[in-house]
Amino acid sequence: MRQREPLAYSNPLDLLRRFVPTPLKANYLVGHVQVTVQTNDFTLLPALPLGARLDVHGEQTLEWRLVRDADSHGNLEEPMWLRSGMLTIVEMGPSCLLGLDFERRELLGFIGAAVDARTYQEYLVPMLCRMTKEAHPRLAIDGSGNKNEGADDE
C-alpha cells in the first residue's frame, strides 16, 4: 500500500513555514481539554480517542498545529525545554521544534521527515499531551466546580 506524502509546500517568502496549509483536522479530548489538531500529514494525527464536547469552554481548548517538514532531516535528540512567561519551547534537534503559547492556547510543532509514525505516536504524542495538561491546570475547572488536580491557587 502506498503511503501518502505530506502536501508539497514551497514558498520562498515563508522560510519559517508559518503559512504551510494544514488541511487535515480532528478533535480529541486530552483530560478535560478539547484539542483540535490541524496538520499537513495524515501520520501526524494522534492515535488518541476522538472526541468533541459541546460543554467545553474557551479556556479548556487548545489547538495543535503540526507541520511535517520534509526538508528537515536528522534524528530526534534529547529535548531542551525553554520556558519564559506564557511561552514554552521544546527543541529536539533539527527534526522537531515545539512551541506552546499559553495565552493564545496554541501548540505549534514542526516535525521532520526522519520522525516515523511509531516514534511520533510513542514519544511525541505523550509529550504533546503532557504539554497540553501543563497549559491548563490553572485554567481548567472540572464539572463539579472544583479545580483540577495540580491547579494553582490564586
Image (cartoon, rainbow, N blue to C red):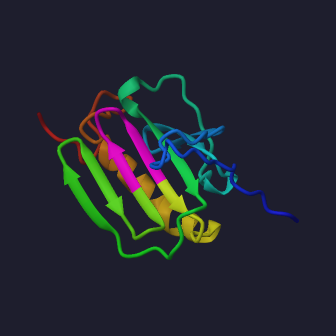
Question: Image quadrant of residue 53?
Answer: top right
**In the depicted structure, whether residue 80 falls above or below residue 33:** below
The furthest residue to the front = 12
Question: Image quadrant of residue 139?
Answer: top left
Return the x and y of residue 16 as percentages of the image width and height.
Answer: 45, 49
Counting every numbered tag in the picture gives 0
Specify the principal SS of the magenta part.
strand
Taking the spot 37% from the left edge, 35% from the top edge, the residue there is 105
Q: Is residue 153 left or right of residue 91?
A: left
Return the x and y of residue 12 as percentages of the image width and height.
Answer: 54, 46
Q: Quadrant of the N terminus?
A: bottom right
**In the depicted structure, whether residue 78 falls above or below residue 32:** below
Q: Quadrant of the C terminus?
A: top left
Q: Which of the pair 7/142 is nearer the observer? A: 7
Q: Range of the magenta residues?
A: 98-109
Please tell me whether residue 105 belongs to the stretch shown in magenta: yes
Return the x and y of residue 56 as percentages of the image width and height.
Answer: 46, 26
Please tell me whether residue 139 belongs to the stretch shown in magenta: no
Return the x and y of residue 121 as percentages of the image width and height.
Answer: 57, 64
Question: Image quadrant of residue 151?
Answer: top left
Q: Is residue 51 left or right of residue 86?
A: right
Q: Which of the pair 50/92 is nearer the observer? A: 92
Taking the spot 28% from the left edge, 51% from the top edge, the residue there is 88
The furthest residue to the left = 154
